[in-house]
Amino acid sequence: MPYTYHHVIDNNEIMSKFYGILPVEQATAMLYFHSKGMAQELIHNLKYRKQEEIGTILGSIYAHELINSDKIPKVDYIIPTPIHKKRLQERGYNQVTTFCEALSKELQIPIENEVLFRIKHTKTQTKKSKSKRAEMLSNNFEIKVKDHHVGKHYLLIDDVITSGATIEACAKALLEIPGSKVSLLAIAYTQ
């Protein structure tokens, strides 16, 4: 598999991508995403062909890599990048859920689904430029903060980081929580 090994590199490509844009603690991706590559096939099967077990398998594999790394900071909650309720009804599931559940089980970090919400339904962004993606995502996410959310370190998880617009919009929303910190993790990263 096309592993990135970002979890053992201090200033990896994702950290560089968000440098000066987001104050992230750490950022990593499991695999490199290439057109017609293995990661693309796995993600497409997970996302569009209802093969949710792929997320479980990948999450378990990556959790074992992360456990053996001293580069991943201690986090309080895992946050799956939310999808809009209309998309959830269409697809039937959030494609990162099983990946997050496997990480949660292996790393003993709870998942928090009640803080970050997608409030606008948008069409797929796969063919859009970075500026168009950012424009589409402005004000797409909101937070609902409770006392136990304040001052926590969140591990935000997405399936693929391409332009970074989705995960950036989510992270910015989470960083509105007083005293919060955010780290980023993706199943795959497009170079």
Image: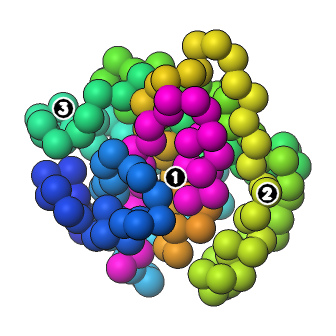
Residue 67: which disc? 3
Indicate the secondary structure of the residue bearing disc 3.
helix
Q: Position of residue 69 (x, y in %)?
A: 13, 39
- State the quadrant of the C terminus: bottom left
Instruction: Between label 2 and label 1, give the one nearer the viewer.
Output: 2
Residue 139: which disc? 2
Determine whether, in the image, residue 136 is placed left or right of residue 59. Answer: right
Position of 169 relative to 157 (above/below) = below
Image-quadrant location for residue 52: top right
Indicate the secondary structure of the residue bearing disc 2.
loop
Q: Label 1, label 3: how many angstroms apart (C-alpha)?
A: 19 Å
Mark 2 crowd level (few <14, some 14–19, many ≥20, 10 Å Cα): some
Position of 111 relative to 62 (above/below) = above
For this rendering, which residue is in front, 74 or 34? 74
Q: Position of residue 75 (x, y in %)?
A: 36, 28
Indicate the secondary structure of the residue bearing disc 1.
strand
Mark 1 or 3, nearer chain start: 3
Amino acid under label 3?
Ile
Q: Label 2, label 1: how many angstroms apart (C-alpha)?
A: 18 Å
Amino acid under label 2?
Asn
Reading the image, the residue beneath label 1 is: 158
Q: Where is residue 141 in the image (x, y as percent from the top left)?
A: 74, 49
Mark 2 or 1, nearer chain start: 2
Instruction: Between label 2 and label 3, give the one nearer the viewer.
Output: 2
The residue at 85%/58% (across/down) is 121
For this rendering, which residue is in front, 99 or 29? 29
Q: What stretch is highlighted in magenta?
A: 168-191
The residue at 44%/37% (across/down) is 181
Residue 96 visible at all: no
Image-quadrant location for residue 20: bottom left
The residue at 55%/57% (across/down) is 167
Which residue is outermost to the top? 147
